[in-house]
Amino acid sequence: MTNPILWITLLCLFGSVIYKKWVSEKALRKLYAFKMKQDTDSFLKLLDSPYCRFNFSKVSLLMMKLNYFIDLQDHDQVREIYAQFASLKMNADEKIALDSRMFGYALQFRDRALAETCRDQLMPLLNGKKGQKAELIRGEVEQLDRIYIQKDTTLIQELTEALPECENDEIKSLIAFRLAKLYHYENQPEQVEIYLNQAMRYTNNDKNRKSLMAMISDPSELD
């Protein structure tokens, strides 16, 4: 005879998983709405509520907070929040996600010291991981390091060969932009203009187009 207590237990567990998924999605929708309005007080209040603390890990909550202030470009808050991760227990995937995000942020805002710190923390983690995802992240970190930190213009040939082989227009735009940056290091303004215009032609992202237009008008933005 089937044990009714077992069935009740399984039903309760199944129900709690569905409820938690529904609550998580509802919370994320609310957080996203506050983020779009840049309603910082409401965003932080919801993030710190029992409602969110029950449904998300401490790492996830802090990562959402970090991403919020990265989007606001509030550098003091970003640095303060990043430092708080040191007190949390994190697995390798969470550390990779965090330092990948901060590496890109540091490069974007030309914080070389922070970028090097994130790179040095990322590479041992990535070298210890197998699989295509880890390889892609490792390759990207290495390439960005060569472009933004090492300013290695020998990469021009590799990227020039890769550009026509790429089928995704947004990635082609990214490659063209990186070529423009490398040619800027070599003080070749004609090549810079060619590749910035190519990057503009390939992208449909309005934010990227605005940035590229600013660089075409003032190439010193590529420094």
Image (cartoon, helix red, strand yellow):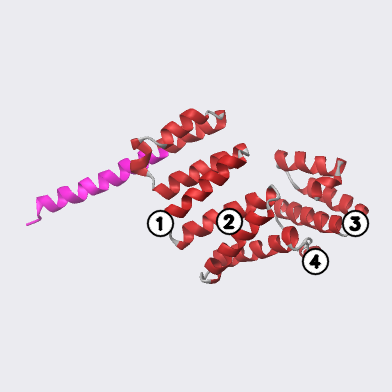
Question: Of the residues under marks 4 and 3, which one precedes in the sequence?
Answer: 4
Question: Of the residues under marks 4 and 2, which one precedes in the sequence?
Answer: 2
Q: Residue at x 84, y 53 (%)?
A: 195
Q: Residue at x 81, y 68 (%)?
A: 154
Residue under label 4 = 161
Between circles 1 and 3, the one closer to the viewer is 1
Distance between the Cα atoms at labels 4 and 3? Answer: 21 Å
Distance between the Cα atoms at labels 1 and 4? Answer: 43 Å
Query: Which element type, helix, strand or loop, lies under badge 1?
Result: loop
Q: Main secondary structure of the magenta part?
A: helix
> Three-letter amino acid code at disc 2?
Ser
Distance between the Cα atoms at labels 2 and 1? Answer: 18 Å
Question: Of the residues under marks 1 and 3, which one precedes in the sequence?
Answer: 1
Please state the horizontal and vertical placement of residue 33, each as a whole percent of the image. 51, 31
What number is the disc on residue 133? none
> Three-letter amino acid code at disc 3?
Asn
- Please give the count of numbered marks on the rendered protein: 4
Residue under label 3 = 187
Can residue 206 be found in the magenta stretch?
no
Q: Magenta span covers which residues?
A: 1-25
Q: Is residue 199 left or right of residue 13?
A: right
Residue 116 visible: yes
Between circles 4 and 2, the one closer to the viewer is 2
Residue under label 2 = 100
Distance between the Cα atoms at labels 1 and 3? Answer: 46 Å
Quarter of the image for the N terminus: give it. bottom left
Task: Place residue 89 in its image quadrant.
Answer: bottom left
Residue under label 1 = 89
Q: Is residue 107 left or right of residue 180?
A: left
Would you say the residues marked 3 and 2 are in contact, meaning their CB atoms lie under 8 Å apart? no
Please state the horizontal and vertical placement of residue 30, each as a whole percent of the image. 45, 32
